[in-house]
């Protein structure tokens, strides 16, 4: 299985450094696209008012800094089974609708460098499943690197850059499956997060599978201990704790979705875990 090894990281860094001067105004021109907090705001809420703003929520970060954090996160997600756990849940969900030999369009919201889609592609190849991968993110420069990096690993993707209209740019049933990992808590405030889930359901032809952090008693303390025991670097440790502190409860999200559209009640399901600090969201669209 392909990995983000040191040689690949060096190649990416060298390539990006040659582009920085040509794109030195990129961040200033595109700062409105660098964060889900900015993309989705409907009022005066801004990233500077969020006490739990994470590294990748900061639109002023240079590209190389963001890549450093995203690559470190990708490594942790592989090493500690985060991707594997997601795929296990997705496989259970996926098997409900999959028809052998069909090509499956997959749309990842908040993809970053596409690590999750890459792992799903490798998983699919072992099972004879062909995916049409689509990466969706607010960061255009990161998506460009993702496309080149994944191509070097034999994985082809289509890039989708978020606009101010967010998922409203896409028609109903645009993609077979819509997925997302550890992204929903970045969308502020909670009513906008619920709307984002509802939009994912609208553009999905077959279903939606989402996993995100679940703040509950003891979860923040447990996260701190886990980070210390396994030597997680400072950026990821601090951001992980902030993610847990700002995470939404599945009950709150479910209530907001049901209040807006009661007809969805029998099609979606939130699943929480007693010992695990995350929840799963499954939506299977009716035929």
Image (cartoon, helix red, strand yellow):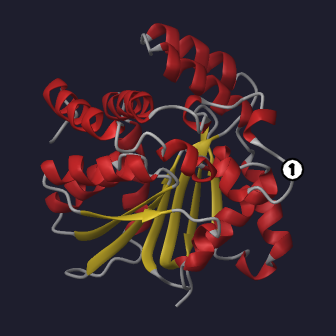
Q: Is residue 57 above or below residue 169?
A: above
**Residue 224 falls in which quadrant of the image?**
top right
Q: Judge from the rendering whether residue 257 lies leftward or rightward of residue 183; answer left or right.
A: right
| Nearer-the-camera pick, 166 or 203 | 166
Question: Which residue is label 1 attached to?
Answer: 44
Residue at position x 68%, y 22% from top? 220
Q: Is residue 165 above or below residue 181?
A: below
Name the spot of residue 198 as percent of width and height, x first.
67, 70
Name the spot of residue 211 as percent of width and height, x first.
54, 49
**Residue 128 falls in which quadrant of the image?**
bottom left
| Nearer-the-camera pick, 92 or 36 | 36
| Residue 116 visible somewhere in the drawing | yes
Which residue lies most toward the bottom here? 287
Q: Is residue 142 above or below residue 134?
A: above
Q: Judge from the rendering whether residue 100 lies leftward or rightward of residue 153; answer left or right.
A: right
Residue at position x 51%, y 8% from top? 228
């Amino acid at each position: 299985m392909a990995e983000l090894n040191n040689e690949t990281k060096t190649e990416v860094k060298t390539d990006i450094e040659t582009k920085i001067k040509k794109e030195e105004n990129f961040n200033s021109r595109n700062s409105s696209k660098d964060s889900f907090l900015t993309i989705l705001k409907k009022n005066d809420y801004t990233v500077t008012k969020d006490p739990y703003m994470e590294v990748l929520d900061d639109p002023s970060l240079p590209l190389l800094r963001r890549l450093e954090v995203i690559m470190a996160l990708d490594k942790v997600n592989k090493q500690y089974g985060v991707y594997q756990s997601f795929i296990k849940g997705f496989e259970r969900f996926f098997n409900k609708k999959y028809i052998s030999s069909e090509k499956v369009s997959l749309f990842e919201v908040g993809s970053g460098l596409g690590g999750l889609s890459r792992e799903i592609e490798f998983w699919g190849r072992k099972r004879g499943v062909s995916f049409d991968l689509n990466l969706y993110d607010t960061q255009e420069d990161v998506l460009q690197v993702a496309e080149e990096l994944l191509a070097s690993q034999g994985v082809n993707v289509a890039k989708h850059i978020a606009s101010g209209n967010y998922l409203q740019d896409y028609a109903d049933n645009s993609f077979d499956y819509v997925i997302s990992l550890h992204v929903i808590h970045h969308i502020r405030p909670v009513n906008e997060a619920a709307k984002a889930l509802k939009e994912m359901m609208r553009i999905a032809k077959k279903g939606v599978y989402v996993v995100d952090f679940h703040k509950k008693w003891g979860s923040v303390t447990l996260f701190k201990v886990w980070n210390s025991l396994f030597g997680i670097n400072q950026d990821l440790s601090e951001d992980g704790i902030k993610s847990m502190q700002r995470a939404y409860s599945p009950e709150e999200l479910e209530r907001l979705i049901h209040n807006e559209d009661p007809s969805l009640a029998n099609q979606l399901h939130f699943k929480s875990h007693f010992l695990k600090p995350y929840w799963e969201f499954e939506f299977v669209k009716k035929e």
